[in-house]
Image: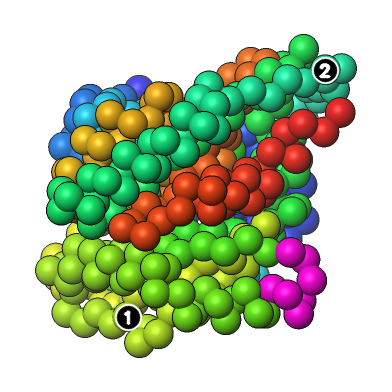
Amino acid sequence: MPLRARTVRVDAHTADDDRAAPTSFTSTRRSLRGHGTARVIEVPAPWPDHLDLVARALSTMAGDDEVGLPGSGPVAFAALPFDRRAAATFQVPAVVLGSTSDGERWITTTGTGTGTGTGTGGDGALDPTPAVTVRSPGSITVRSPMDVVAWCGSIETARSRIAAGELRKVVLARCLEVIADEPIDPVTIAARLAAAHPEALRFCIDGFVGASPELLVSRLGDHVRAQPMAGTIPRSGDPTIDARRAAELMLSEKNRIEHQITIDAVHDALLGWCSYLDAEPQPSVVRAGSVQHLATLVEGRLSHPIPNVLELVAALHPTPAVGGSPTTTALRLIDELEDTPRGRYAGPVGWVDAEGNGAWAVGLRSAQITGRSAVLFAGVGVVADSDPETELAETRAKFAATLPHLVTL
């Protein structure tokens, strides 16, 4: 039998069920939390060329929806690979609890029956499920596949390529591996990150967890938003020092150049889809845990026919904030200089509904958890006057947003 989705409004008690969800994407405006699996949608390589498979699959599942808001009806979640040449997987949960900041609450169930669907009782509440026992680790090891001397050498190599005129900017990432003596629970780590970074875009999808400060793109109806970030300085925790550092960041020629490269690329990528598009005239400084970033909001109205959010994701990724400029040259240099494949790090992570609405973050401040191991990355934008020791310090500051939540004993 074909899968069908049914969405009904529910009271706050039901939608605010605080049991951790194995699949979730949450912002300050909208929360979607999924339980169970109704369908897995396999997207062949290269994933940007086959995203129509997701839109078609969701359209066949659309059913009764008394809410009619972005995120109601059947929803597919994914953490997409950074590498556009790879395949991807989307998950449609059997049950999704949705809520918005203005008080709307709903539950969507997707299954083969005509009732409320697998995983819910007749009143729309989640059925009781056995608690999962999570054992705390007794020992944890953290290692870096590339030592810091070699990594700083890669920054020098990138600088020399930029000086030679091959490219303007490249983003290079460091990797850390965390190994525990007990399985690491993604839902537990996701909850810790969400509590520590309530203003971030928080996600837990197929073992990929994080709290990203950066909105790649959202599409709600014909309204499109992106908030690219590039240019970083560490935070100290002292308001006076951090205010001074924020001013330094705004005045830094290196960081302003790096930031403008990204803003121009995002604006140009979206412009062809829009009847109206505008970017803030000056960047702002956004606090993101242990660091501060330059950020610029880009916002507009989409032309008709309105594109699916996945079309916008494919058009934008990777931005210069996580790849470089020119993109093709930067990606070749990343392949050459990085010793560990990024996987989903810095790839798009988010959700899409049957109407083509969705919200997608850049998969930063994240960890891929598999069994007893977790893999983390932190990247820096390298331009002509980048200093290797300064860039190394930046990676350490970025790891500080995620690593402490993984190594808690």
Q: Say whether disc 2 or disc 1 marks the residue closer to the N-terminus.
A: 2
State the image coordinates of residue 30 (x, y, percent, origin top left): 56, 61
**In this picture, which residue range is highlighted in magenta?**
236-242
Amino acid identity at mark 2: Ser
Give the answer, above or below, for where 141 lies relative to 332: above
Q: Does the magenta portion include 357?
A: no
Measuring 77% from the left and 12% from the top, which residue is drawn there?
Answer: 181
224 vs 286, left or right, is: left
Residue count near mark 1 (Cα–Cα under 10 Å), binned few <14, some 14–19, many ≥20:
some
**Secondary element type, mark 1:** strand
- The disc at residue 139 is 2
* Furthest-bottom residue in this view: 281
Residue count near mark 2 (Cα–Cα under 10 Å), binned few <14, some 14–19, many ≥20:
few
Amino acid identity at mark 1: Ala
196 vs 117, left or right, is: right
Q: In front: 290, or 84?
A: 290
Measuring 21% from the left and 35% from the top, which residue is drawn there?
Answer: 332
Q: In front: 95, or 80?
A: 80
State the image coordinates of residue 351 (x, y, percent, origin top left): 43, 47
Q: Quadrant of the C terminus?
A: top right
- The disc at residue 279 is 1
Give the answer, above or below, for where 296 lies relative to 316: below
